[in-house]
């Protein structure tokens, strides 16, 4: 069996049924055993000191209390209703919550002693960072936990009002649902994850790779795109490849998937066999697209002219497994 992609197989129990036990959730927010994963405007709190890989920084309930000026049952209730606390699940029986600190302009200042001291964290090297910039250097379980926390908080930030009637919404189920507060509407809104297909197109011993305009210099990757309404995944693969390169594909085979909370996607990885050869690049989307020989890819070392996609990406995985004959 293949090993999971980065950000998948998080190593925690979501304990979804517990979300519907509001008293248990409220008690856990005040429980000294609970762990809080702060999120500030889609950034995660990490510790990075010299000569060591970054780690996730998490807070104790005491630290959370000093950060938000005290925790009472009323405050917990109110914060839960805003979606400022989201129950993520259990790790070794310990409840984990995402904590939204986006309302603070300078949360690191708020988090300086005593909040960090209460959490047993040294101030040096602590910062809020974009998970993408850490590029898979975090332990995979920590990466998955921070990705989930970030994704949930992004969803809450974009669903404060009902898409049906425009009234404010309120968080329920420990942050896993928002309900419209207008009783005549009461529409329920659930966290979204939008599917995108990502595919390595091959023609015998050649693979089709493209450069997006926004890529770092030299980086080539697999083609990718969003699944549109009314479209099967196979249709989406064929359409995206055709739109971006004018290549037609025949057989499409599923490989694996990867949660991609940047901001709210799941990447569905495929191999697709080309049935045509001549590339016409859509320069609206891509800067370049070409066929690359397997032997060339195997011998090339990343440089300014060509580099592989990031190690934490499913794109890299699709290419790597193909090169390895998988
Ligand atoms: Zn509504």
Image (cartoon, grey):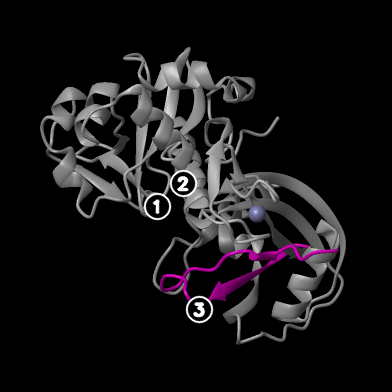
- Residue count near mark 3 (Cα–Cα under 10 Å), binned few <14, some 14–19, many ≥20: some
Q: Which mark is residue 42?
A: 1
The yes-or-no answer for disc 1 within 8 Å of ligand 1 is no
Task: Please name whichever residue, 297 or 62, is drawn nearer the observer in this view of the structure.
Answer: 62
Quick one: 226 or 234, which is closer to the camera? 226
Disc 3: which residue: 213
The picture places residue 75, in percent across and down from the top left corner, at 34, 31
| 124 vs 109, nearest the viewer | 109
Q: Distance from label 3 to label 2 (Cα)?
A: 29 Å
Q: Residue 250 in the image: state x and y as whole percent.
A: 89, 65
**Left or right: where 253 falls relative to 39:** right
Secondary structure found at label 2: helix
Q: Is residue 213 above or below residue 297?
A: below
Q: Is residue 218 magenta?
A: yes
Q: Which residue: 84% across, 63% down? A: 231
Which callout, 1 or 2, points at the residue further toward the start of the chain? 1
Q: Earlier in the sequence, mark 3 or mark 1?
A: 1
Camera-side mark, 1 or 2: 2
Mark 3–mark 1 CB contact (< 8 Å): no
Q: Does 176 sit left or right of 77 as displayed?
A: right
Mark 2 = which residue?
A: 153
State the quadrant of the N terminus: top right
From which residue to which does the magenta span run?
203-230
Residue at point 74%, 62% (across, down): 227
């Amino acid at each position: 069996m293949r090993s999971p992609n980065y950000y998948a197989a998080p190593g925690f129990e979501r304990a979804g049924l517990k979300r519907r036990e509001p008293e248990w959730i409220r008690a856990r927010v005040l429980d000294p055993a609970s762990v809080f994963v702060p999120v500030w405007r889609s950034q995660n709190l990490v510790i990075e000191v010299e000569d060591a890989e970054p780690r996730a920084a998490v807070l104790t309930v005491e630290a959370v209390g000093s950060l938000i000026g005290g925790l009472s049952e009323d405050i917990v209730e109110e914060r839960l209703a805003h979606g400022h606390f989201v129950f993520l699940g259990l790790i070794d029986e310990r409840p984990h919550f995402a904590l939204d600190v986006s309302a603070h302009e300078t949360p690191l200042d708020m988090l300086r002693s005593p909040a960090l001291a209460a959490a047993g964290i040294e101030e040096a090297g602590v910062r809020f960072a974009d998970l993408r910039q850490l590029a898979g250097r975090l332990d995979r379980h920590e990466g998955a936990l921070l990705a989930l926390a970030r994704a949930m908080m992004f969803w809450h930030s974009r669903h404060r009002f009902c898409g049906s009637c425009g009234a404010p919404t309120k968080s329920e189920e420990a942050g896993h649902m928002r309900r419209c507060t207008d009783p005549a509407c009461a529409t329920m809104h659930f966290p979204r994850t939008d599917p995108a297909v990502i595919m390595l197109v091959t023609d015998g011993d050649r693979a089709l790779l493209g450069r997006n305009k926004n890529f770092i210099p030299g980086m080539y990757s697999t083609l990718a795109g969003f699944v549109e309404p009314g479209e099967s995944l196979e249709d989406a693969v064929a359409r995206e490849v055709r739109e971006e390169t004018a290549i037609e594909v025949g057989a499409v085979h599923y490989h694996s998937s990867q949660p991609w909370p940047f901001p709210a996607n799941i990447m569905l990885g495929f191999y697709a066999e080309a049935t045509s050869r001549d590339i016409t690049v859509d320069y609206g989307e891509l800067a370049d697209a070409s066929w690359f020989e397997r032997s060339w890819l195997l011998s090339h070392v990343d440089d300014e002219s060509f580099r592989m996609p990031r190690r934490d990406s499913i794109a890299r995985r699709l290419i790597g497994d193909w090169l390895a004959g998988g």
